[in-house]
Amino acid sequence: MHFHAVAYARIGLVALRQCSDHRGMNIFQTLLTGMVIASPIAACAADTTGNQTAAATGAAIHVNQLGYLPGSAKLAVLGLPQDAAPTADRFTVEDAQGRQVLEGKLQAAALWAPAGQQARVADFSSLRAPGTYRLKIDGQPASDPFPIAASAYRPVLEASLKAFYFNRASTALPAQFAGPYARAAGHPDTQVRIHPSAASATRPADSVISAPKAGTTPATTTSTSSIPASAPIPCWPPTSSTRHCSRRRP
């Protein structure tokens, strides 16, 4: 697995930690802890400095492009091929006008043997002023721009809530909120007919129960609330007034 194909560790989740929380972490904990929302910038990313050499050899500065909270820890990672020549030991951070606002020292290089890659961490947690910035290292293409803002993660929150909303099956989605995805409520009936595979002594096959609030849709239950894309289809046909329900796909 190529080092550039994964989100560089800790850049994402570390943004939710306070600066003092990460001082005791070693380099591998730093690199392997937060692979969720960090930016996997490709080795062929656009060269904003005019220097194509670093990009051609697979070097890249990885930042959390979603941004960082003003008071959170802030890390970037310089990813390098295993046999890359030593790099500059210093990094700088510039604002949107190209003015240098911070300078710091890169941490010592650490090797991730499975990927054949090495990495150096830049800690710029002391930068708290809201704005848009880039991180630069001599001889390397500049990082992609990233914001520092109290609302940096609000778009992610809104997108997550919207995903749950759009997955609702028994709730109508009006155009006011759902736009082009507006639709009527699914599964309007509340009567569920028991499939033989789900029958029991107290709930025989073909008996009918009322299920106005069925909860979620794991593999072993029935749902009229939401249908995750990865869950089996427990009820069919969806247009009938009574649905057959099973613990497995029909």
Image (cartoon, grey):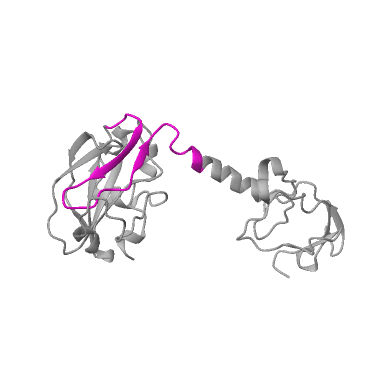
Q: Is residue 178 magenta?
A: no
Q: Quadrant of the C terminus?
A: bottom right
Q: Quadrant of the N terminus?
A: bottom left
**Residue at left offset 12%, top offset 56%:** 86
The magenta region covers 127-156
Q: Is residue 114 visible?
A: yes
In this picture, residue 125 sits left or right of residue 199: left
The front one of 248 and 39 is 39
Q: Is residue 149 magenta?
A: yes
* Quadrant of residue 194 within the rendered picture: bottom right
Q: Return the x and y of residue 99 as percentages of the image width and height.
A: 23, 34
Vertical side of 24 occupied by 78: above or below: below
In this picture, residue 151 sits left or right of residue 107: right
Q: Return the x and y of residue 43 as percentages of the image width and height.
A: 29, 60
Vertical side of 219 occupied by 176: above or below: above
Q: Return the x and y of residue 229 as percentages of the image width and height.
A: 62, 59
The front one of 128 and 51 is 51
In this picture, residue 191 sits left or right of residue 104: right
